[in-house]
Amino acid sequence: GSTIGILGGGQLGRMLSVAASRLGFRTHIFEPGAEPPAGHVADAVTTAPYEDDAALRAFASACDIVTFEFENVPTSALDLIEAQVPIRPGREALRISQDRLTEKEFLQGLGLNVAPYADIPDQAALDAAVASIGTPSILKTRRFGYDGKGQVRLRSAEAAGGTMSQMGGAPCVLEGFVDFSHEVSVIAARSVTGEVACFDPGENVHRDGILHTTTVPARLSASQRTDAVLMAARILNALDYVGVLGVELFVTPQGLIVNEIAPRVHNSGHWTQQGCSVDQFEQHIRAITGWPLGDGSRYADVVMENLIGDDMDRVPELAREKNTSLHLYGKASVKPGRKMGHVNRITR
Ligand code: ATP
Ligand code: MG
Ligand code: MG
């Protein structure tokens, strides 16, 4: 079989490796950090920094196609890899989603609704934007944020004073606070031939900025469901995307607002492992290897719950629960806020 290279060796890389292996592919992980969770299940692992050109070249020459589970791969590393082997999804999706400002401009350009936002290079820009966008609002670093890191909520104009120094001088965007009733996400896929399929939208609840649960079906009307799927398809087509992409949405009385997109398999799509014949990981592998998309229709109601940090202490009880699938990532150590695993509970 041919070999799929995966940039990033976290839990997403691990579950992609398992899915690839089930379809008869080999996987090769490239990961700078020690003891990557994906390392235990992949066929090969390269442990090297993204600045190690020789290691990148050797990795690329061992692969027939390269994908990623991590968005912040340096451009120079992608250039080196792409000189030898195709990267799917393509570079454009990464470029756009790596930067919240570029991402917002792209989404707005597609005619999709986003929160009111402003480019914030410095404190003066923040003071001006707080005056126009108002409060409550959220200041986010343009790059590198995840699990709510690199974000400050501003309750009042006074609270904005000096906030840019808290961000370590990193360029930011200010977003008006969206008064949503709930949050949902669409996990969407597009094949090499342009076929598009979406999993049923999931309803997401966050705790301390980290995804806590995803519930399917989400509370959405038929027309909201249609809107969500059409929005995801518009994004996929605009990017000529190949693979799985996550779209996070706010539900408001005025319609759906796009929060952000992730050009990869997504934590809020983990329920598909127990809710569908073909889950998001297999769907991604199918898409990037030129297979037809699989049947991702939902045959069960599922609640996915993330196991974070000390939630690992509950594993002995969880292991006894009925209708519950346990997924553990084999991480070397438990840390507060670290995603250690998840459970999928079939509720109907
Ligand atoms: P992820 O781990 O999903 O990549 P992230 O660090 O990129 O998270 P966001 O998705 O931007 O962060 O924000 C995290 C959560 O904060 C959102 O899911 C939502 O609950 C809340 N939030 C973010 N932006 C807004 C906004 N403009 N209005 C209201 N709530 C918001
Ligand atoms: Mg994000
Ligand atoms: Mg998010």
Image (cartoon, grey):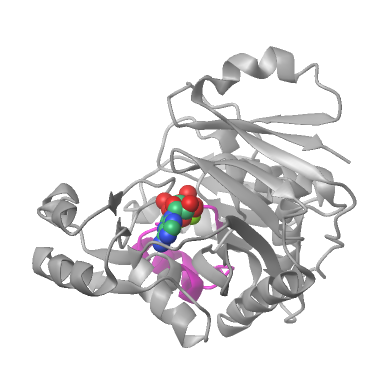
Q: Considering only vertical position in the picture, is 15 above or below 298?
A: above
Q: Nearer the viewer, residue 179 or 160?
A: 179
Left-right relation of 76 to 318? left
Q: Nearer the viewer, residue 217 or 59?
A: 217
Q: How many marks?
A: 0
x 68%, y 76%: residue = 227
x 82%, y 43%: residue = 274
Quadrant location of the C terminus? top right
The image position of residue 95, as x and y in percent, is 41, 71
Left-right relation of 281 to 153? right
Query: Is residue 156 highlighted in magenta?
Result: no
Query: Is residue 89 highlighted in magenta?
Result: yes
Q: Considering only vertical position in the picture, is 132 above or below 344?
A: below
Left-right relation of 192 to 277? left
Left-right relation of 348 to 74? right
The image position of residue 333, as x and y in percent, is 47, 21
The image position of residue 303, as x and y in percent, is 74, 40
Q: Nearer the viewer, residue 209 or 9?
A: 209
Residue interval drawn in magenta: 68-94
